[in-house]
Image (cartoon, rainbow, N blue to C red):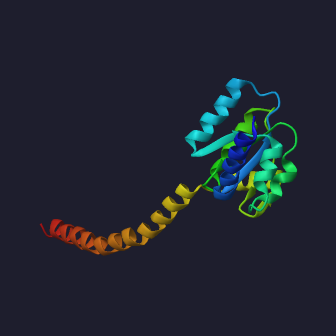
């Protein structure tokens, strides 16, 4: 790899570190090509991405970035899983690690906050952005449906009372 290619990789990694909501660092020694393709497919389905990069270039790209604290994890054969959604990449990495002993999560970063192994697990258990939005939308709609039900209920009660009275009178 010549100098121009290395500079391009450093720039790409710098953009990843700057724009990602979460970055997870893991060791992948011993994974087969098929297993890596499976990890990439799962990440793609969750709007996340997987990137293998030279540790030295990744450390250069981290200089001055919010997630600079993950530089300590960049030793050995490392793979980066990242996403704009602050939860997606952590969920993908955790799910993949459960089914594959060769994929070992070291830690990561969420913005300026460094995450250890337990931190990545905690982030992966949080609801995703879409789940939070749907929950909030459901909460906003619930009072309106309750009011509509309460307003409509007395009229139906009166109608059933009147029909009962009418049946008794006949």
Vertical placement of 40 versus 14: above or below? above
Q: Position of residue 153 (x, y in %)?
A: 31, 71
Nearer to me, 82 or 4: 4
Residue 166 in view, yes or no: yes
- Residue at the image point whose x is 82% and y is 58% from the top: 69
Residue 125 in view, yes or no: no
Q: Position of residue 85 (x, y in %)?
A: 60, 55
- Residue 155 occupies quadrant: bottom left
- Residue at the image point whose x is 69% and y is 40% from the top: 51
Nearer to me, 75 or 104: 75
17 with respect to 163 (left or right): right
Nearer to me, 162 or 145: 145
73 with respect to 93 (left or right): right
- Residue at the image point whose x is 76% and y is 59% from the top: 67
Return the residue found at the far left.
170
Q: Position of residue 100 (x, y in %)?
A: 76, 32
- Residue 50 occupies quadrant: top right
Vertical placement of 12 versus 40: above or below? below
Count of marks overlaid on the render: 0
Nearer to me, 106 or 57: 57
Q: Quadrant of the N terminus?
A: top right
Q: Quadrant of the C terminus?
A: bottom left
Q: Position of residue 146 (x, y in %)?
A: 39, 70
- Residue at the image point whose x is 67% and y is 35% from the top: 39
């Amino acid at each position: 790899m010549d100098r121009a290619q290395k500079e391009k990789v450093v720039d790409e990694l710098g953009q990843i570190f700057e724009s990602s909501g979460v970055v997870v660092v893991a060791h992948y020694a011993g994974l087969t090509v098929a297993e890596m393709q499976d990890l990439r497919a799962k990440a793609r389905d969750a709007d996340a991405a997987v990137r293998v990069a030279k540790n030295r270039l990744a450390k250069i790209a981290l200089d001055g970035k919010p997630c600079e604290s993950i530089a300590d994890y960049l030793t050995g054969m490392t793979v980066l899983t990242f996403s704009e959604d602050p939860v997606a990449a952590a969920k993908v990495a955790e799910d993949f690690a459960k089914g594959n002993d060769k994929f070992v999560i070291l830690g990561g970063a969420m913005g300026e906050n460094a995450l250890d192994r337990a931190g990545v697990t905690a982030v992966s258990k949080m609801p995703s952005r879409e789940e939070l939005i749907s929950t909030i939308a459901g909460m906003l709609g619930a009072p309106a449906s309750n009011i509509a039900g309460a307003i409509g209920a007395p009229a139906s009660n009166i109608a059933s009372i009147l029909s009962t009275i009418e049946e008794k009178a006949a």
